[in-house]
């Protein structure tokens, strides 16, 4: 019989926690044919990613995943063979008792946040024995050998290529969102937290010589965007033009469509953890707005990733690219940085595809988890 899996997700903030666990749950079911229960403590955050979902259902099936509301008042259930606690979300005490009560041992994994820092491969797979006798193993996603890899569906890159090669697919997808861009316009998607550097980036795009169509999914950056446009609201689908820049607000789309949006654009500004990885699989240049952490810990993460990513770029392109990322994350003047990146546009674009292919040589995270369990039993 196939091992059963329980994934626990506590929605702390934004869509990252549910974004990662929903993606992982789907992939385990679809590619490894294992039964997965996904326990989520806030289904409101799930609905935008999976619009068929019911935000109030205690139990529902979505794309083969048994999605459960993780209730405050936990009701006893039998523990699964493999238990994933996402981002140290703390399992219910009763569930820990259920793990102990099982006749066959349970593999309890804490799925950690993504980081490119050096220490990650040294800590990946380490177990800690708790005072209550239970063992918890730390599973780290990552970019290098010795880590758990990145979430990537087996057919993801083939689907992207098929989308790119089909002359109608991109147009039909964009039309479905109400996007009709000029033929010569560069498409850019913008998913970010509030950012004081946005106005200077928009100024630079508006006064540049290249036509740009900026697609902005509903979200936290909207306030800064409206202030720059000097309007009170931008209805979904509506367009505003300033110089060379066309700005369009988009609805928040289902998770699979967000991939298509990234594939349709020439450059993607992303945030958090999951959109950051998806933009890399899109094989296009990206700009990461990292989630801010206490004591500036996010800068260490950002620079660790940059150090890996820029390998293979010429020194001038690497400097321009890193400068843009630093300015965006500092909320500082983006104009000189954006203009600097234009000079290396084709090199940076080619490099993005190379990075994507290089990363795709690693085992993906779901595969690595399944293998880890097989080796453990
Ligand atoms: O929403 P986020 O900012 O989540 C963050 C990060 O996960 C961060 O690491 C964490 O600590 C913090 O929350 C609490 O960014 P992220 O991770 O990119 O998640 C967004 C999800 O939303 C991702 O799965 C892609 C998805 N998405 C859509 O499905 N449709 C859309 O239109 C858009 C814009 C995003």
Image (cartoon, rainbow, N blue to C red):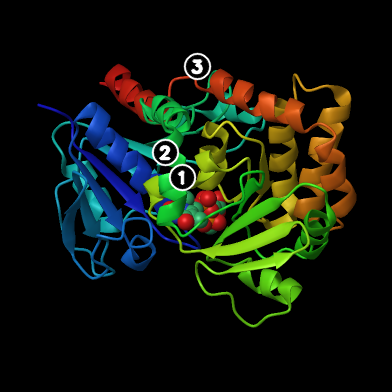
**Tags 2 and 1 in contact by the CB under 8 Å rule?**
yes
Classify mark 3 as within 8 Å of ligand 1 or not, answering yes or no. no
Q: Position of residue 341 (x, y in %)?
A: 82, 39
Q: Which mark is residue 171?
A: 1
At label 1, counting other C-alpha atoms closer than 10 Å, the crowd grade (few under 14, some 14-19, many 20 or more) is some
Of the pair 214 and 134, the residue shown nearer to us: 214
Q: Position of residue 40 (x, y in %)?
A: 31, 58
- Looking at the rendered structure, the secondary structure element under dot 1 is helix
The residue at 55%/69% (across/down) is 238
- Looking at the rendered structure, the secondary structure element under dot 2 is helix
The residue at 75%/38% (across/down) is 303
Question: Where does label 3 land, which residue?
Answer: 361
CA gap, disc 2 to disc 1? 5 Å
> In this rendering, would 60 be left or right of 186?
left
CA gap, disc 3 to disc 2? 30 Å
Which part of the image, by quadrant, shows the N terminus?
Answer: top left
Question: Compared to 314, does 182 lie above or below?
Answer: below
- Looking at the rendered structure, the secondary structure element under dot 3 is loop
Question: Where does label 2 land, which residue?
Answer: 168
Q: Position of residue 163 (x, y in %)?
A: 42, 33
């Amino acid at each position: 019989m196939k091992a059963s899996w329980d994934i626990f997700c506590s929605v702390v903030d934004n869509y990252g926690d549910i974004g990662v666990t929903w993606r992982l749950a789907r992939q385990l079911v679809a590619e490894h044919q294992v039964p997965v229960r996904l326990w989520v403590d806030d289904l409101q955050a799930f609905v935008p990613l999976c619009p068929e979902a019911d935000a109030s259902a205690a139990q529902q099936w979505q794309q083969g995943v048994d999605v459960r509301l993780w209730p405050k008042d936990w009701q006893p259930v039998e523990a699964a063979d493999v238990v994933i606690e996402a981002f140290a979300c703390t399992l219910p005490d009763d569930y820990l008792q259920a793990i102990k009560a099982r006749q066959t041992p349970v593999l309890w994994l804490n799925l950690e946040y993504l980081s490119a820092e050096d220490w990650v491969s040294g800590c990946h797979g380490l177990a800690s024995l708790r005072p209550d006798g239970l063992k918890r193993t730390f599973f780290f996603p990552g970019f290098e050998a010795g880590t758990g890899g990145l979430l990537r569906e087996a057919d993801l890159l083939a689907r992207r290529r098929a989308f790119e090669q089909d002359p109608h697919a991109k147009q039909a997808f964009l039309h479905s969102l109400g996007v009709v861009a000029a033929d010569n316009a560069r498409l850019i998607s913008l998913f970010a937290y509030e950012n004081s550097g946005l106005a200077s980036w928009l100024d630079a795009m508006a006064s540049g010589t290249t036509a740009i169509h900026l697609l902005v999914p509903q979200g936290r950056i909207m306030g800064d965007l409206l202030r720059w446009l000097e309007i009170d609201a931008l209805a979904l689908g509506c367009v505003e033009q300033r110089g060379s820049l066309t700005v369009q607000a988009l609805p928040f789309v289902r998770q699979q469509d967000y991939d298509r949006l990234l594939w349709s654009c020439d450059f993607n500004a992303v945030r958090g953890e999951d959109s950051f990885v998806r933009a890399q699989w899109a094989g296009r240049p990206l700009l990461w707005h990292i989630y801010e952490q206490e004591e500036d810990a996010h800068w260490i993460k950002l620079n660790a990733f940059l150090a890996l990513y820029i390998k293979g770029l010429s020194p001038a392109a690497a400097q321009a690219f890193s400068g843009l990322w630093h300015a965006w994350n500092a909320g500082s003047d983006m104009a000189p940085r954006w203009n600097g990146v234009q000079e290396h546009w084709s090199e940076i674009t080619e490099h993005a595809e190379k990075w994507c292919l290089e990363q795709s040589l690693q085992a993906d995270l779901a595969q690595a988890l399944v293998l880890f369990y097989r080796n453990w039993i």
